[in-house]
Amino acid sequence: MISILRKRDISNLYISLAQIIAKGLRKFKDIESSGSPVDLSEKEWKVCLNIMITGFSLYAQDKGMYIPNELKLMKKARELFAERFEDLWTQ
């Protein structure tokens, strides 16, 4: 599924991982149709997914400098990803 990481991918591993995570979350959101985690409504779950996708997409851009709102969003994306990691599955 995931190709072997090259040396240049390892030099900024967080960027490589952010690219993989953002792409995976986009696909997950597109195919995920079995609802949401039991403690969230479907609308709340979509909001969580959108925050994670946007935050990791910002990391993947590797802009170097971010405005405060972007930094806040990136932090929230990391927190949600860690919190909701085990909710990322489909039937």
Image (cartoon, grey):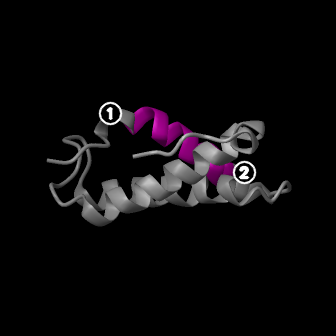
Q: Where is residue 37 drawn, in percent x and y?
A: 23, 44
Q: Is residue 16 above or below residue 60?
A: above
Would residue 81 appear left or right of 34 to someone viewing this image? Answer: right
Region of the chain picked out in magenta, as a range: 72-84
Residue in the picture at 30% in, 39% down: 87
Residue position marked by numbered label 1 in the rendering: 86
Residue in the picture at 25% in, 62% down: 31
Q: Nearer the viewer, mark 2 or mark 1?
A: 1
Helix, strand or loop at label 2? It is: helix
Q: Where is residue 8 drawn, in percent x and y?
A: 75, 44
Would residue 5 appear left or right of 46 to someone viewing this image? Answer: right
Q: Is residue 70 above or below residue 75?
A: below
Q: Residues within 10 Å of mark 2 (few under 14, many from 20)?
A: some
Mark yes or no: residue 64 visible: yes
Q: Where is residue 41 drawn, in percent x and y?
A: 23, 54
Instruction: Say which of 18 and 72 sits in front.
Output: 18
Extreme-right residue of the structure:
65
Residue position marked by numbered label 2 in the rendering: 71
Marks 2 and 1, Cα distance to the nearest angstrom? 24 Å
| Magenta-colored stretch includes residue 79 | yes
Helix, strand or loop at label 1? It is: helix
Instruction: Indicate the amino acid at tag 2.
Output: Leu
Residue in the picture at 14% in, 47% down: 91
Residue in the picture at 56% in, 61% down: 54
Q: Is residue 11 above or below residue 1?
A: above
